[in-house]
Every structure is written in structure tokens, then in C-alpha cells.
Amino acid sequence: MANVTHPQAGAKRATSASDPIYADIKARILSGRLPPATPLRQDEIARSHGVSKIPVREALRRLEVENLVVFEKNKGATVRFYTETEILQLLDIRIALECRALELAVPNMIAADFRETQALLRDYAQKVEVSEWSRLNVQFHQMLYEPCGNRQLLAMIDDLQQKLGQYLRLLVTEATGLERPMREHQDILSACMAGDVDAAVAALRAHIEATKKEVAAFLRRGA
Amino acid sequence: MANVTHPQAGAKRATSASDPIYADIKARILSGRLPPATPLRQDEIARSHGVSKIPVREALRRLEVENLVVFEKNKGATVRFYTETEILQLLDIRIALECRALELAVPNMIAADFRETQALLRDYAQKVEVSEWSRLNVQFHQMLYEPCGNRQLLAMIDDLQQKLGQYLRLLVTEATGLERPMREHQDILSACMAGDVDAAVAALRAHIEATKKEVAAFLRRGA
DNA sequence: ATTGACAAAATAGTATACGATTTGCAAGAA
DNA sequence: TTCTTGCAAATCGTATACTATTTTGTCAAT
């Protein structure tokens, strides 16, 4: 079954006209520049990218599968929004995926991993800019999971992070402050360094559950 | 943020020409009728469905995002295959998602759930047809997770099951026999009925890990 | 003023058409 | 024979063009 010479092996698929359009719209949705319910006019996108509607539609169909846009027959595509319930459910899925990734990663971590992650946490504590917090937070989590060696799992985690970021970028950091997350991050890392898988997973789970509670409160207050 | 009147709320999107094509090709890939590396000729598919290439390409782009087909520039789409490593990694993701779903589901289970699931297991034991085993197995798992109430999570589990089924439909049941899985299924259900979340999750995890070992052995033998 | 009907404009969806790339095959050279 | 080389056919990718549906704007009747 394994077949190294087959085209799809390493294959960064050569680019088609829909690829840059796909990437552009996706980035704009995930960054919040295209808020939920924004209509995505095909002619307009086509014109702005200097192509016809066909690659545009292909890009939009791809985003549809990723649950980032919604098609309505003869009305076109709009940026999808997630309900409060769905956002909280995504956090439950985060717990599943990230705990598993960490569980698989801990046995593979080496000294260099610990050094780099520890250094990241130090930077984290010193940054004052709120916009940096979010980026560093994501990076911390990625560094924890990366040694798990399961690319598909890492991709799913990344996908979730981006979707949630679209809604939570500001809140979590601003509303929460840094103390709790920082303390929890350190707990997780310490358990990893001790090689205690169960403790690390428990700490991570508690961390995400705490985040979930904050998010739930925030959304109740009417986001 | 919640908005019941918004178009995308309940929204079964009205059908476009690419929908039936998408569904057809997806079903044929997942059932194994279109084996990995099969080229998917756009003109041919278009002709057989009585449409032009455009809806066909949209369908294929959707399948590409789902990792079911691969595009190569100017060569078109082929059915994607997963390597042995990737299949085993999918099983690791199964552990993550299904254990989480069960954990969330157990507290929501009611007497009727137990009755139906128990009945299913009895049927299971009496069926002789191998083809039925696989279907009943999937159904058993779905019934366990359904009370978790997280549609997105259930959809992801279903997606995984189908992708794995494409490769493992026969093997797992034929190579393994029924004794082990049956015993493990009963263990899981008993723990659920006792309301013991931890025991249920532990039993499920052991069940999937055992499956993973069998799959690994099967694949090593050269599937 | 408000509503209803209808025409006009905008937009979506898809077939057709065509240039570009790849593939298959045959003929000739090593 | 085996390896090039060079068409010809097949196939892909996308622009153009046309139809169908939805939205918008206008005007008359209430």
C-alpha cells in the first residue's frame, strides 16, 4: 500500500487559479475582516482577482466544506457564523484533540523542546501587547503538541484554533488577564518535563475547561 | 449572536447541480467501488450525469477538502489513498473523539438508550453474515455517542468511521472474529449502565487500541 | 403614508468554447 | 531490440456567454 513514487506522496499540488482566491478569502474570514453573514459576491471577487467566476466558485465550494461559508441556491455564498452552542461544542472537541495530542507528544519530547517552550513562556510574561498574547498562546500550544508526530491530528487542532480565534481573539485574553493562563501553562509544561503524562493531560484539560467557562460567561453577557 | 431567523439557521441548502455528483462520487469512494488512485475524468463524469464540467469540478473540489481526492495541475483528480501510517493515525484520532463523545454522552443516557443498545448487541451476536457485522458495529458506536448532543463531534466521528471503513471494512471483522469485540462492547455498555464514566471511557479506549493493534498487524502483513 | 404589482437591474448557476498541457503511439536512430 | 523524437488525441483549466432567479426601484391604488 505504501508507495513512495506515487504522485500524491509528497505532492504540494501545483497551484490553480482558485488557490490564491481560496487562501485570500479564508484568511480574511479567519482574521475577522469578513464578519459572519457577509455576502461573498462572485463577480466582485472575480474582478478583484482578475479571473472569471469559475475559480471563484471552486474556492467558495472548498470553504463551504470547511464550514466557513454557506451557499444558498441562487443567492450565493455568505460567511457562516457559529452559534454560541456551536462555539462551546468546538471547545469540547478541542479538549478531545489537544489532550490526545499531548498524551502522544509527551513521550517524544526532548530537552530542546523543553528549553524552547520555557523560553516562549518567559517572552509571553514580558509582552505587554494584547495582540501578541493570542499569537504566543497559540504557539505555546502548538509547541506542546508538535512532537506527537500525527500530522492529521495537528492539522485538525490548527483548524479548530483558527475557527475559534475568529470569534475569541480578543475576549479570552482581555477579559481573563494573564495570571490564570500563565500559571496553568507553567503547570502543563512542568508535568511534561517530569514525564508525567497523566498529570500533563489533566492540567491541559483543566486549562481548556477554564477557558470554556470564561467563553461561556462572555457569550452569555451577549457577545 | 444566536439568530433563529437568519437563512443559515436550519438551512438544508437547496440542491445545486454539483450536489448529486458530490454525493455519488463520495459514496463510491467510501464504499470501495472507486479504489485509491483511480483517475476521475471530468468529461466522463459530466456526461454520465448529463451536465457540464463545471458542477463536476465543484464536486471534486469539495472532495479534495475532505481528503478523498487529490488534484494535480493539468492531470486532474484521482482517488486519494492513505498510507499505513496515516490509517493508524486516524485510529489515534478516533480514540480522542470517541472517548470524548462517550464521556459527554454517559451522563445523558436514559433507560431507553440502554434497552435499544442492549437489543442491538443481541442481534449482533446472532447475525452470521460478515457484511452485517460491520454495519452493526458502526451502529453500536453511534448509539453510544449520540446522547452527547454535540453534532459537530458526531459528524467528525462519522466522517472518520467512513474513511476507515473504506480500508478496513473486511479485515477487522474477518481477521478478528467476534469474540473479543463482543466482550468489549458488553463491557463498555455495562459501565455506561452503571453510570461509571471513567470505566466506560477506559473500556472504549482499550477496545479501539485493540482494534488498532489488529489493524497494524494486518497492514504489516501487506494489505 | 402604505401597500401591491410590475419592470429593470443585479446576481447566481451552468453550458459552450477554446487555448494549454499531458499522454499515447508510431516512426526512426542507436 | 531499445531508446528517442515528434505528432495526434485526450484531457484539463478557465474565459465567455446565456438563462434563470432574486432583488431593487418605481408608480399607481388604497
Image (cartoon, coloured by chain):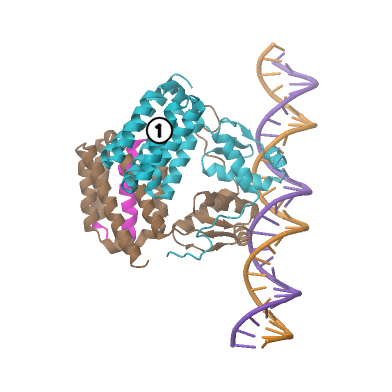
Chain colours: A brown, B cyan, C purple, D orange
Residue B90, by quadrant, is top left
Which residue is found at the position 54% from the left and 35% from the top? B30
The answer to whether residue A153 shows anywhere in this view is no
Quarter holding the C terminus of chain A is bottom left
Q: In the picture shown, does residue B118 fall above or below A129?
A: above
List x then y, in percent, for residue B69. Answer: 56, 38
Which residue is found at the position 70% from the left and 42% from the top? B49
Which residue is found at the position 57% from the left and 56% from the top? A71
Q: Residue A65 or B114: which is nearer the viewer? A: B114
Q: In the picture shown, does residue C25 fall above or below B108?
A: above
List x then y, in percent, for residue A96. Answer: 34, 44
Residue B149 is one of the magenta-drawn residues: no
Q: Residue C24 or B156: which is nearer the viewer? A: B156
Q: In the picture shown, does residue B2 fall above or below B208?
A: below
Q: What secondary structure is the stretch in magenta mostly built from?
A: helix
List x then y, in percent, for residue A106. Answer: 27, 37
List x then y, in percent, for residue A161. Answer: 38, 51
Residue B195, by quadrant, is top left
Disc 1 chain ID: B
Q: Residue D25 or A174: which is nearer the viewer? A: D25
Is residue B16 found left or right of B105 in the rendered image?
Answer: right
Q: Amino acid at mark 1?
A: Leu
Q: In the picture shown, does residue B38 fall above or below C4?
A: above
Assess disc 1: are there few (<14), some (14-19) or many (≥20) residues with their C-alpha within 10 Å of its C-alpha: some
- SS class, disc 1: helix
Q: Disc 1 designates what residue? A: B121
- Residues in magenta, as a range: A125-149
